[in-house]
Every structure is written in structure tokens, then in C-alpha cells.
Amino acid sequence: MFKHLLGKIFLTAEAREIGESFERHDIKGAEVVGRGTIVVDGKTIASSQEFIRLKEQAQKIINSREQQPTHQ
């Protein structure tokens, strides 16, 4: 409650929106370290389901291009 109240007083609407977005998307390891600076733990990002899914899609694209014959 107290933390929520402080956020209303000291944070801009944009900063509150970003924080709420982190909560909605269940982003862990994110920390605001300065004015407009957010640091997110890379391990947290790399282990997220969305990142893993996107990585698999990227690998499929790379594999399909490697299998195409080169034209000389």
C-alpha cells in the first residue's frame, strides 16, 4: 500500500505505466536504476517462454536459408 502510494506521488504516468506493464507480463529481474533507465537481467529474458519461441522461429529461418542452393 505504502509503495503504491509513493509511486503515485513520485513517478510520472509513463513510469507507472511501464511498471504496470512489467507486472502484467510477469517480467522478473527488471530494475529502474535511473531516470529513464531500466536494467533487465539477460538470464531472465533468455529463459522466458516468448524468447524461447522467438529463438526457435529464428533458427528455422536460418536453417531454411542454409539449405537453399547458392546461385553463382
Image (tube, rainbow, N blue to C red):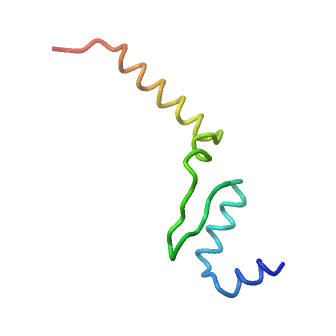
| Residue at image point 69% right, 87% down | 9
Q: Is residue 19 positioned above or below 60 on the image?
A: below
Quadrant location of the C terminus? top left
Of 66 and 44, which appears nearest the observer? Answer: 44
Picture coordinates of residue 66, whole percent (x, y) = 35, 17
Q: Is residue 12 positioned above or below 64 on the image?
A: below
Of 15 and 44, which appears nearest the observer? Answer: 44
| Residue at image point 58% right, 69% down | 32
Q: Which image quadrant is residue 5 in?
A: bottom right
| Residue at image point 66% right, 60% down | 22
Which residue is the extreme one toward the right? 1
Picture coordinates of residue 14, whole percent (x, y) = 58, 75
| Residue at image point 63% right, 81% down | 11
Q: Is residue 68 positioned above or below 22 on the image?
A: above
> Along the horizontal axis of the image, is 61 left or right of 17?
left
Quadrant location of the N terminus? bottom right
Total marks in image? 0
Which residue is the extreme one toward the left? 72
Picture coordinates of residue 28, whole percent (x, y) = 68, 54
Q: Which image quadrant is residue 15 in?
A: bottom right
